[in-house]
Image: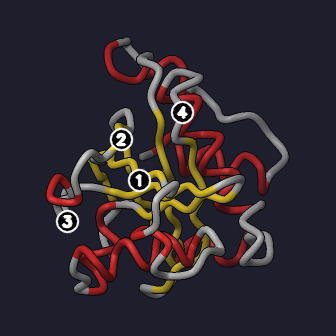
Amino acid sequence: MSAAREAIESRLQAAEPAGAEARVVGGSLKKKCGAFVTLTRQGRLRGCIGFVVAERPLLETVREAARAAAFQDPRFPPLRAQELPEIRLEISVLSEPGPVQSLEQIRVGTHGLIVRRGARSGLLLPQVATEYGWDRDTFLSHACAKAGLPGDCWREPGTEIEIFSAEVFGEEGA
C-alpha cells in the first residue's frame, strides 16, 4: 500500500519514490501480476486504473496504476496535492482472466468481468457488484455498458466474457 501512496506523492512533488525498492525482499512483489488501484475521496470514486495483463512485477504495476489513477483517469481532473490527505487507496491484485464457458461459472462478489465485442471491452472488478448489490445479469449488463455496448450484448453470440478474481487490500476508510 505504501508503494502506491509514495508513487502518487512523488509525482506531486516531482521526485522518485524514496526507498521503496529497499523494503522489497522478493516474493510476490516481484511476480508479474495484473493490478488495479482505486482512489476514493470521502467514500466516492476519485480514480481507478489498472492493468489486466501481467507485464511487469507487481510492485511496478501498482506504482504505475496508482499514478495513472491519480493523474490520468479521464473521468476526473488530475489529483491535487491538497486532496491527498483525504484520498484512500485500494489495490486489487488480479488473477489471470479466463474465458467463461457457462454463465453459471460467474460468482458475483468473487469474480470480476471482462466483456469484449469487436474492438470494445469493459472491465468491472469483483467488488463493484457487491458494492451495488447487483445480481449476475445486472453485473453483466453494467460490464457491457462500461464497454460502450448495449446492456444486453452479453446475451449475443460473438460477445466474449472472461472472469478473474482479485485479492483486495485497502487503507482504512477506503
Q: Secondary structure at mark 1?
A: strand
Q: Which residue is rendered at x = 39% and y = 61% of the image?
A: 125
Tell me the amino acid under the disc marked 1.
Ile
**Quarter of the figure with residue 21:** top right
Do residues under tags 1 and 2 come within 8 Å of each other at their CB atoms? Answer: yes
Furthest-top residue in this view: 26
Instruction: Give the mark, 3 or 2, whose residue is nearer the N terminus.
Output: 2
**Rendered position, 134 above or below 144:** below
Tell me the amino acid under the disc marked 2.
Pro
Circle 1 crowding by C-alpha within 10 Å: few under 14, some 14–19, many from 20: many
Using the image, tell me which numbered label, if any, was put on residue 161: 1
Instruction: Give the mark, 4 or 2, whose residue is nearer the N terminus.
Output: 4
Q: How far across and down, in percent of the image, does residue 61 sit? A: 56, 34
Quadrant for the C terminus, please: bottom left
Do residues under tags 3 and 1 come within 8 Å of each other at their CB atoms? Answer: no
Q: Secondary structure at mark 2?
A: strand
Using the image, tell me which numbered label, if any, was put on residue 99: 2
Mark 3 → mark 1, Cα distance in angstroms: 16 Å
Q: Which residue in the protein does label 3 denote?
A: 109
**Quarter of the figure with residue 104:** bottom left
